[in-house]
Image (cartoon, rainbow, N blue to C red):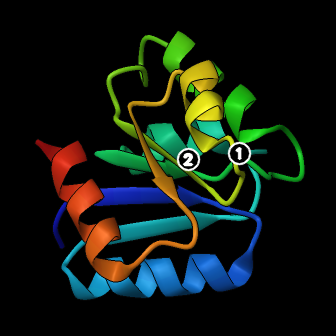
Amino acid sequence: MGDRIIIFDDDQDILLVTAAILQRRGYEVMCRENCLTMDTDLQTFAPQVILMDNWMPDISGVQAVQHIKRNPAFKAIPVIFFTANSNVEALATEAGADYLLKKPFDIAGLQEMIAVALK
């Protein structure tokens, strides 16, 4: 398999579709519907990119990204903040995300954003 990407999103349909798109492109993908095991998942899966939704059931995507970026073991992993919120730019900045992707997104936009994050 290729580069590893972990997706955090509480919407199972988004997880399935996004994972399928990325897997077809040769990426190894892990999907999580919450952030309860985030530290363990990041440690064991060692992703090259993180996709983080804002609406998570346990903590917000903003809080999750802030946690990731405070942790020396994870802070260098590029985070793509992706959400349908109208203020996605402000949320991504508050979170400290490296990139943002507005939902709904098209396949080309997703692939381009992943390619940019992996450089």
User: Between 81 and 12, which is closer to the camera in this rendering?
Assistant: 81
**Numbered tag placed on residue 47 in the rendering:** none
Amino acid type shown at disc 2: Asp
> Which residue does the numbered mark 1 point to in the structure image?
37
On the rendered structure, is 51 left or right of 12?
Answer: left
> Which residue does the numbered mark 2 point to in the structure image?
41
Q: Is residue 47 visible?
A: no
Amino acid type shown at disc 1: Thr
User: Between 14 and 83, which is closer to the camera in this rendering?
Assistant: 83
Position of residue 59 measured from the top left corner of the image (x, y, whole percent): 84, 38
What element does badge 1 sit on?
Answer: loop
User: Between 19 and 96, which is closer to the camera in this rendering?
Assistant: 96
**Dot 1 and dot 2 residues touching (CB under 8 Å):** yes
Which residue is rendered at x = 73% and y = 27% of the image? 63
The image quarter containing residue 34 is bottom right
The image quarter containing residue 70 is top right
